[in-house]
Image (tube, helix red, strand yellow):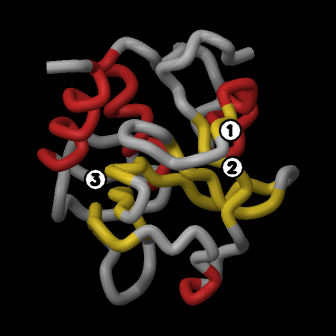
């Protein structure tokens, strides 16, 4: 199994677990903790990095890719205020811990990279944490 498939396997094992702002897993997650949990288990999480969505984006922004693909991370908000992050399953599907009132759990959904229907800003970037170009 390649590392991207392993990341998705770990992500889907978390499906349905509750969302809680500030939670660090493994029983509850917020959006950044969900990615960190996966990345720790696939060997790419750099310990000591700010563990917010903004901090993760700042660390991996050297790995921006133009087209989303399996194992990438999607970051939403604005460049100076990243407010949400998810894991890309494929070009059309994402999985992540979201705090929308109707769900508040790890969910899978169609990738709406303009996510404004949930009160989030547009997609800022897609990054590939498995590239070796990060800061």
Q: Is residue 130 left or right of residue 70?
A: right
Q: Residue at x 25, y 64 (%)?
A: 18
Q: Is residue 1 left or right of residue 132?
A: left
Q: Secondary structure at mark 2?
A: strand
Label 2: how many residues lie within 10 Å, few (<14), some (14-19) or many (20+)? many
Residue 104 coordinates in the image, percent (x, y): 34, 74
Between residue 69 and residue 61, name the one nearer to us: 69
- Is residue 128 depicted above or below 99 in this figure? above
Label 3: how many residues lie within 10 Å, few (<14), some (14-19) or many (20+)? many
Q: Residue at x 45, y 16 (%)?
A: 44
The disc label shown at residue 57, or none: 1
Q: Are marks 1 and 2 in contact (CB under 8 Å)?
A: yes
Q: Which quarter of the image is occupied by the C terminus?
A: top right
- Is residue 49 depicted above or below 133 in this figure? below
Which residue in the structure is indicated by mark 2? 125
Q: Which quarter of the image is occupied by the N terminus?
A: top left
């Amino acid at each position: 199994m390649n590392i991207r498939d392993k990341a998705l396997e770990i992500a889907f094992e978390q499906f349905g677990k509750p969302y809680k702002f500030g939670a660090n897993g493994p029983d509850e997650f917020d959006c950044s903790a969900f990615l960190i949990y996966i990345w720790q288990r696939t060997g790419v999480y750099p310990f000591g990095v700010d563990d917010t969505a903004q901090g993760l984006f700042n660390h991996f922004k050297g790995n921006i890719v133009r087209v989303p693909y399996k194992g990438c991370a999607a970051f939403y908000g604005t460049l100076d205020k990243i407010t949400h992050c998810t894991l890309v399953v494929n070009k059309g599907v994402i999985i992540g811990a979201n705090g929308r009132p109707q769900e508040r759990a790890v969910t899978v959904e169609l990738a709406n990279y303009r996510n404004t229907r949930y009160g989030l800003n547009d997609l800022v970037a897609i990054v590939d944490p498995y590239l070796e170009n990060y800061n």
